[in-house]
Image (cartoon, rainbow, N blue to C red):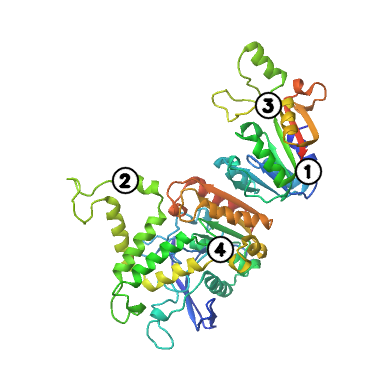
């Protein structure tokens, strides 16, 4: 499937949860399939931390540019683009096309840098609703996401209850735990204490806080994999054939892997974006306005739900998903819950476990158009 | 008369149903179609969960052995445990939990006191294998068999009141010597 990224520009200011106002903004997005005449077959796919609107397919002349969820979305895939019109939308604050910290600040003409406001899941959903209006989608057949994307799917059912028929919420949590926030804070500290960070105004200096980004990514990667998956993949294997080196260069394969992932990430991801996304994760807590009562928070929701968790996910554990299920049951929502025992940890939501994909395929098959 | 028909007869129209060990969701589908009763199923088996999703019934993949903490007190009219009691390790806490979550419970199980089962043990000297109990002793999911007498004694111990009992043999209702002549027992109970 050959696809093309597009951009939509919005000049109506976006008032953010923080109180800040984004005077104008662009959203990068892609669409796959065709919106039917009744406009009843649209599915919004929300992305997680380091992904983008490029959900599926590849760009012309770039066969290696496969979308991040290409095993899930496409012709004949579980989310079948022969039947559904799928929209992938890049969130505000990203470094992959939507307006973000590296975009020019209209007030100065220079990159926003540290002055780009802190954005939240609620803000992203509000912006996506503008995009939906632009595309002529009054009501989504489904809004779907994994991890941070799942938070957006949840929030859609709360911000716009009448605009979502089904929410597919994968590897989710209704709020980060203190431990989750702690990992994010270590990642942010790695970035902010990098001498090349310059308080977030590093664009002007022609440098990138590479060291901080590397460490942030290494920390993230540890939390995405289960202990078992990491042991299975790397074990205690050494790089060298002659035993340990007795120095501080790369000894273990896992060290090599983390360094490689960190290096790769630091070449394409923006540090200011990373700070903001982790904050968006930390702040998300729809129950906060209801005294911590998630059931009360979901009283507004009207959608049907499919919730999926992975038992090896220690970042957002199955227990967190069961809290969501409980809140939905308390509100008598139509809900199914899949608890998959794929061993890979949080990242399992991106992999193609046959039971997981089979269930998604069956679920989408039953969504009437 | 099938088990499904007996159970459906005990479910008031539009009542809220929780089916524990719901298999492929056939009963839930039936209750929705015939009684407009919205239900949720609990099932642990991957293949069954997938069939439930195909059947478009609400299914929650959870282990009954972990209890029913996912469900609020009195959140259902009827909690059903159909042909699953004998596969549970700890029946007492589950039965108690069923009547915490539901106003009423429906329990059905293969009667181990059925005469064919008795004969297989008493005369042939081997564990019963039958239409209702198709497993060999070494590959059965069933861990705790019981008879009508046993189950009713447990109900008494747990202060569960038996509202109705139906005993079946090959689709026919058995009223004479049910513990001997019935192969399947169904109970409607309350706290």
- Name the front one of labels 4 and 3: 3
Q: Which label sits on residue A235?
A: 2
Residue A152 at x, y percent in the picture: 54, 65
* Circle 1 residues within 10 Å: few <14, some 14–19, many ≥20: many
* Circle 4 residues within 10 Å: few <14, some 14–19, many ≥20: many
Mark pair 4, 1: CA separation: 35 Å
Residue at 26% across, 50% down: A252
Q: Which residue is mark 4?
A: A153
Work out which quarter of the rendered image holds the C terminus of chain B and state it: top right
Q: Which label sits on residue B155?
A: none
Q: Which residue is mark 1?
A: B11
Mark pair 4, 2: CA separation: 36 Å
What secondary structure is marked by label 4?
helix
Residue A176 at x, y percent in the picture: 50, 62
Mark 4–mark 2 CB contact (< 8 Å): no
Residue A139 seen anywhere in this rendered image of the structure: no
Image quadrant where residue A221 sits: bottom left
Mark pair 4, 3: CA separation: 47 Å
Q: Which residue is mark 3?
A: B146
Judging depth in this view, the residue of B96 and A270 nearest the camera is B96
Mark 2–mark 1 CB contact (< 8 Å): no
Precedes in sequence: disc 3 or disc 1: 1
* Circle 3 residues within 10 Å: few <14, some 14–19, many ≥20: some
Precedes in sequence: disc 4 or disc 2: 4
- Name the front one of labels 4 and 2: 2
What secondary structure is marked by label 1?
loop
Task: Establish if B9 lies above or below A266.
Answer: above
Residue at 58% across, 55% down: A323
- Name the front one of labels 3 and 1: 3
Mark pair 2, 3: CA separation: 48 Å
């Amino acid at each position: 499937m050959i696809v093309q990224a597009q951009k939509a520009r919005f000049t109506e200011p976006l008032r953010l949860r923080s109180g800040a106002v984004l005077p104008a903004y662009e959203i990068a997005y892609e669409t796959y399939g065709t919106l039917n005449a009744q406009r009843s077959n649209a599915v919004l796919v929300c992305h997680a931390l380091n992904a983008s609107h490029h959900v599926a397919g590849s760009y012309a002349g770039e066969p290696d540019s496969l979308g991040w969820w290409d095993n899930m979305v496409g012709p004949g895939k579980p989310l079948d683009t022969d039947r559904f019109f799928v929209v992938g939308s890049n969130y505000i604050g990203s470094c992959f096309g939507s307006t973000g910290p590296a975009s020019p600040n209209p007030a100065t003409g220079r990159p926003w840098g540290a002055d780009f406001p802190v954005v939240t899941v609620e803000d992203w959903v509000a912006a996506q609703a503008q995009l939906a209006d632009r595309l002529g989608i009054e009501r989504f057949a489904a809004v779907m996401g994994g991890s941070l994307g799942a938070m957006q799917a949840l929030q859609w059912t709360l911000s716009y209850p009448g605009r979502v028929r089904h929410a597919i919420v994968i590897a989710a949590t209704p709020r980060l735990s203190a431990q989750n926030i702690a990992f994010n804070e270590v990642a942010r500290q790695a970035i902010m204490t990098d001498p090349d960070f310059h308080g977030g105004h590093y664009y002007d200096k022609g440098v990138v806080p590479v060291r901080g980004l590397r460490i942030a990514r290494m920390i993230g990667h540890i939390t995405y994999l289960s202990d078992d998956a990491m042991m299975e993949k790397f074990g205690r294997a050494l790089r060298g054939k002659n035993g340990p080196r007795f120095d501080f260069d790369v000894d273990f394969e896992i060290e090599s892997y983390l360094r490689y992932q960190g290096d790769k990430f630091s070449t394409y991801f923006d540090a200011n974006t990373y700070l903001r996304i982790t904050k968006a994760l930390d702040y998300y807590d729809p129950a906060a306005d209801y005294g911590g009562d998630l059931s009360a928070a979901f009283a507004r929701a009207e959608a049907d739900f499919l919730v999926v968790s992975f038992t090896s996910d220690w970042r957002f554990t199955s227990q967190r998903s069961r809290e969501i299920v409980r809140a939905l049951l308390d509100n008598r929502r139509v809900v199914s819950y899949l608890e998959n025992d794929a061993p890979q940890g949080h990242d399992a939501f991106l992999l193609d476990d046959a039971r997981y994909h089979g269930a998604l395929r069956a679920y989408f098959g039953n969504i009437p158009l | 008369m099938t088990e499904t028909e007996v159970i459906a007869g005990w479910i008031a129209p539009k009542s809220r149903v929780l089916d524990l060990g719901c298999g492929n969701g056939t009963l839930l589908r039936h209750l929705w179609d015939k009684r407009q009763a919205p239900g949720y199923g609990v099932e642990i088996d991957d293949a069954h969960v997938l069939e439930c999703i195909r059947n478009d019934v609400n299914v929650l993949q959870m282990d009954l052995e972990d209890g029913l903490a996912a469900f609020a007190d009195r959140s259902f009219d009827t909690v059903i445990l159909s042909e699953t009691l004998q596969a549970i390790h700890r029946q007492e806490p589950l039965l108690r939990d069923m009547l915490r979550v539901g106003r009423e419970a429906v329990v059905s199980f293969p009667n181990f006191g059925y005469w064919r089962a008795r004969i297989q043990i008493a005369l042939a000297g081997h564990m019963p294998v039958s239409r209702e109990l198709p497993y060999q002793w070494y590959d059965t999911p069933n861990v705790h068999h019981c008879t009508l007498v046993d189950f009713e004694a447990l109900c008494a111990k747990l202060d569960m009141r038996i509202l109705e009992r139906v005993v079946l043999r090959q689709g026919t209702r058995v009223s004479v010597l049910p513990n001997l002549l019935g192969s399947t027992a169904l109970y409607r109970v309350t706290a």
